[in-house]
Image: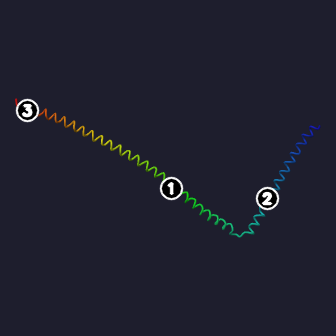
Amino acid sequence: MRGSSSVYGSAVPGARQRNRRRRRKASLRRFRGTHQTHVEEAVDKRLPRDFEERITNNIEERLSGAFEQRIKTHINLFEQRAGLRMQMHFENLETKVTLAADGYGATLKKIERELVDLNKKVDEKFADHDLVLTDHNRRNNRA
């Protein structure tokens, strides 16, 4: 019997606790709503009507100046970093262009030397050919 009463006994306090919680929540909701309304009314009575507008304008004014200054500082820092990067980029580019120009200059000098050598060979062959033709004409004229 005792075991069965303990089962019923434990179920009843749980239900009581739930009921107490529900009642507390409901009374807190009513209190919060009433209290909140009371506070809002008191604030409305004590503060002038344009208070919110003045505070908003003041905050916007302060934030805009600070915000603009932060943006200007950020842009200046970005320009400095970008300037350094661009300077490094152009120095690197200048080095590459110089190397390319030196390479092209060396290639052109090599082509020029090859053309001079080719001209010498062609001149020598034509000179030999001219000598052969001259000798051939001399033999034909004698006969």
Quadrant of image for the N terminus: top right
Identify the residue shown where x is 38% and y is 47%: 98
Identified by mark 2, the residue type is Arg
**Could you say which disc has been placed on residue 80 in the image?**
1
Residue at the spot of label 3: 138
User: In the rendered image, which quarter contains the C terminus?
Assistant: top left
Image x and y of residue 61, in percent: 61, 65
Tag 3, which secondary structure?
Answer: helix
Q: Work out whether residue 82 or residue 15 is closer to the camera in this orientation and state it.
A: 82
Q: Is residue 3 left or right of residue 50?
A: right
Residue closer to the observer: 77 or 46: 77
Local crowd size for mark 1, using a 10 Å CA cut-off: few (<14), some (14–19), many (≥20): few
Q: Are marks 2 and 1 in contact (CB under 8 Å)?
A: no
Q: Is residue 102 above or below residue 69?
A: above
Dot placed on the residue nearer the N-terminal end, 2 or 1: 2
Left or right, 17 with reference to 134: right
Colour option used:
rainbow
Q: Closer to the camera, 46 or 7? A: 46
Cα–Cα gap, marks 1 and 3: 85 Å
Residue drawn at x 22%, y 38% as measured from the top left: 120
Which percent across, then down, holds residue 128? 16, 34
Under mark 1, the amino acid is Gln
Q: Nearer the viewer, mark 1 or mark 3?
A: 1
Looking at the rendered structure, the secondary structure element under dot 1 is helix
Q: Which residue is mark 2?
A: 32
